[in-house]
Amino acid sequence: MSDSSHSIPIGKLLRADNSQFVAGCRVRELETPAFGSLVRASLVDDTDVYGLITNISINDDGLVRQLVSGVSIPGEYTADNRYNRNLPVEIHVLTIGYQSEGQLRHQLPPRPPLSLDQLFLCGSDEVARFTSLGAGYLRHILRLTDQPIEELLVAHLSQARRVQDSLGNPEWYEDACQRLIVLLRDDYMRLTQVLDALSELE
Amino acid sequence: MEPQANLSPENPPIGFVTGGGLEANLQVKLTVPAQTVQEGAFVVMDSGNWRFYGLVTDLQLAAVDPNYASQLNSQRFSPRLARYLNQNTLYTNLAVMPALMLEKGPDPASPEYPAWAQNRPEKVKPITVKTVPDHHAPVKLANAGDIAEIFGKEDGKTIFRVGETREQGHAVCLDLEKFVQRSSGIFGTTGSGKSFLARMILAGLIHANNASTLIFDMHNEYGPSSTSSDTGQPVSGLKQQFQSRVRLVGLGAGTDFGALHADFQLEIAHKDITPEDILQLTQTLNLKETTAATLDALQTSFGENWFSEFMNMRGKAVEEDEEGRRRPRQTAWKPGQTRRACTLAQPKACAASSAG
């Protein structure tokens, strides 16, 4: 299990399968996780499952719908609804690798996380360690069909590039871009959309 | 000669085989800039126990998707991303004509090598290509050893250097001893260097002194010195190069080669010309179908001097014979010569008259 002393707990597992999982957190915990961030779910058997945040959703219920239809909402009602009620913010995570017995791999884990397993936000060290294994895990992102992958790639690669550049390894980003082009070059429309988005990082 | 290892880091692969065949040429995907390879380049491909030798016959631009080639990627994406995109989606294909193959055997360090080495002939020679290399067989420009394997190494005797490879300047040689054992031809488009190459080969043959050469120099290109029509530079002739070993023969009296004189003149006597010689030129001279009969009549009338008599005839010149009939004017009668009172239109009458 990775050292979680520098990792920030941001939620607990709601549901999962081998390729993705959903964690819930309270609104105040929402300050830390961001779209495209690298996160880690720690399993009871000391396996860590790594993923990228692909979506953060805030659901409604009957009370919220009633409140929004009101003329004005007192501040204490808003705070109560956000911080006291048991409606979780859902963090959707795409699985991109796992670590078991000290070995880090960019493959899907043998088993998914279990309900209520803790979800942590990875610090710079963990991001460096995970991405230094190579950029092959990007293929998992390309599996997504219901998310804007170009936005996810921009969000994640900007974080990963910052970390690798700070380690004196600017070639990592070049390799990641080349790998993306090779993976997507048979899909002209998708690749050009991704490159349009990545060009904004240049 | 043992096939030399082509594993030098100074000669990295330029591409790999992606398809094609013996008839339609092999297709090679280039992994280096297209300008580093030219049409006509010699290449080698190692596959299994064989080394294949081929010639680049074409270069074709290609793309993973035509859309990548139809727009300037640098105008849409950042310069770095555009460069990566072009590197990974735009490429060049080579068409390689496989020509020869040589059994080089397995890796000398492999366990199969001793058995193979025991059974192979002492001198392994390239043979005409009979099969194809595998997919993804690496393709390299032929190095000096590869060129020498096929064309031989210049030895100052009969293996004669005729030029160099375009890319790397390796010597391309001709084995003159083998060259003179077979009929050969030099073919090429206008200005491709046929005469130049022929002159070099003739110089090599004369220098090697392993064959006599009879050169029909129809345009005075080889014997006397001349000027290159492409470069305007003077080109030394074989006579200047080899002096007394070359004899210039003028075709016909009075033939000269400027400052150079013919060693002798070749003249053909009129009486050595036969009607068959004329008939061979039917198409060239645009002769009619009646020519054969005419020639036969001339020969019957005038014997071995038929050609001279014919050449002395003047068209439409007529005279009257003893009986007052008009006939083509004949040559002046000389004492002792039988006057033949016949015309070209009456060969049988002429023959009878002569007999009478």
Image (cartoon, rainbow, N blue to C red):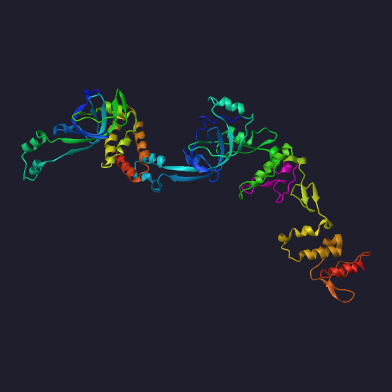
- Judged left or right of residue A197, residue B188 is right
Against A101, is B317 above or below? Answer: below
Query: Is most of the magenta stretch helix, strand or loop?
Result: loop
- Judged left or right of residue A178, residue B96 is right
Q: Give how far across and how far down residue B207 sits, in percent.
A: 72, 38
Residue shown at the point (84%, 57%) measured from the top left: B271
- Front residue (pair B3, B110): B110
- Judged left or right of residue A136, residue B322 is right
- Judged left or right of residue A70, residue B186 is right
The span picked out in magenta is B212-240
Residue A124 showing in the rendered view:
no
Corner quadrant of residue A31: top left
Q: Give how far across and how far down residue A9 sits, in percent.
A: 19, 28
Corner quadrant of residue B55: top right
Taking the magenta stretch, the answer to whether it contains residue B217 is: yes
- Front residue (pair B116, B153): B116
Against B333, is A88 above or below? Answer: above
Corner quadrant of residue A117: top left
- Front residue (pair A192, B122): B122
Classify the position of the C terminus of chain B by image quarter: bottom right
Q: Give how far across and how far down residue B221 sits, in percent.
A: 69, 48
Q: Give how far across and how far down residue A88 sits, in percent.
A: 14, 35
- Front residue (pair B281, B214): B281
Residue B203 showing in the rendered view:
yes
Classify the position of the N terminus of chain B by image quarter: top right
Taking the magenta stretch, the answer to whether it contains residue B116 is: no
Number of numbered discs visible in the structure rendering: 0
